[in-house]
Image (tube, rainbow, N blue to C red):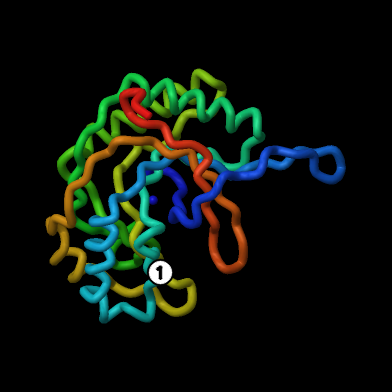
Amino acid sequence: MAGTAEDPVGTLAQPASERPASGGTRVRRRIFLAVALAPTLRHAVAGLEPRFSAAAKSLRWVAPDHLHFTLKFLGEITGAEVTRVGEAARQVGARARSFAITVAGMGAFPSPRRPQVVWAGVSDGADRLIALAADLDAALHRMKFPRERRPFQPHLTVARVRRSGPAPDLTAILQELGGVPVGTQAVEALLVMESTLNPSGSIYRQVEEVRLGGVG
């Protein structure tokens, strides 16, 4: 999924247009901006799961095709606001250029000893990803969306700790994987995504893809 709430990208489809709901209210859509993970890196991240075999019963791994970097989570917003989000993404995309990032190293929030989320980090290109997220945050702020309260930290959510049972101590394995490179990919587009929550897990739909450099 990055300094903000994050969920894995799932099924992609065009969302239904905003329509009046009962009581005269309008449907709100749960929106975030993301960078997709390349297929080769999805496979590489999935290959790390056996390294966590000692904690296998405690971890719920994100499906490979659900992996992404969240740059900005906007929560539930109106259809008119979704339009403004797309405009901000296009403004940022038009002045940004593609760049490469290297996924490397692993850690856990809030700590390896009592983890809730296991993540993979970014080494090379982290500064470019941070700059892209900052540009998006500024563009959205100009369109009356609130600023992020915490600094953006590039990371990829790869697993979550199950709520049942005690949290596993992942200190040793995360130290072992602390600097291990996973792979490199190009960042060439921003995705405006919509999530729909359901009991079996979130379903994600791509609202818009914005190519960096105004291409596409």
Q: Residue at x 26, y 63 (%)?
A: 43
Up the image or down, 34 lies above or below 171; here it is above
The kind of residue on which mark 1 rests is Val
Up the image or down, 41 lies above or below 20; here it is below
Please state which of residues 36 and 131 is positioned toward the viewer in this rendering.
Answer: 36
Please state the horizontal and vertical placement of residue 193, each as a whole percent of the image.
50, 43
Where residue 159 sits, quadrant-wise, is: bottom left
Q: Residue furthest right?
A: 23
Please state which of residues 86 and 55 is positioned toward the viewer in this rendering.
Answer: 86
Up the image or down, 21 lies above or below 99; here it is below
Horizontal side of 96 relative to 162 (left or right) equals left
Please state the horizontal and vertical placement of residue 14, each as a whole percent of the image.
57, 44
Please state which of residues 8 and 11 is positioned toward the viewer in this rendering.
Answer: 11
Horizontal side of 10 relative to 98 (left or right) equals right
Q: Residue at x 19, y 70 (%)?
A: 173
Mark 1: which secondary structure? strand
Please state which of residues 164 and 77 is positioned toward the viewer in this rendering.
Answer: 77
Please state the horizontal and vertical placement of residue 105, each as a whole percent of the image.
18, 56
Q: Residues within 10 Å of mark 1 (few under 14, many from 20)?
A: many
| Residue under pointer 1 | 161
Q: Residue at x 25, y 58 (%)?
A: 107
Q: Quadrant of the C terminus?
A: top left
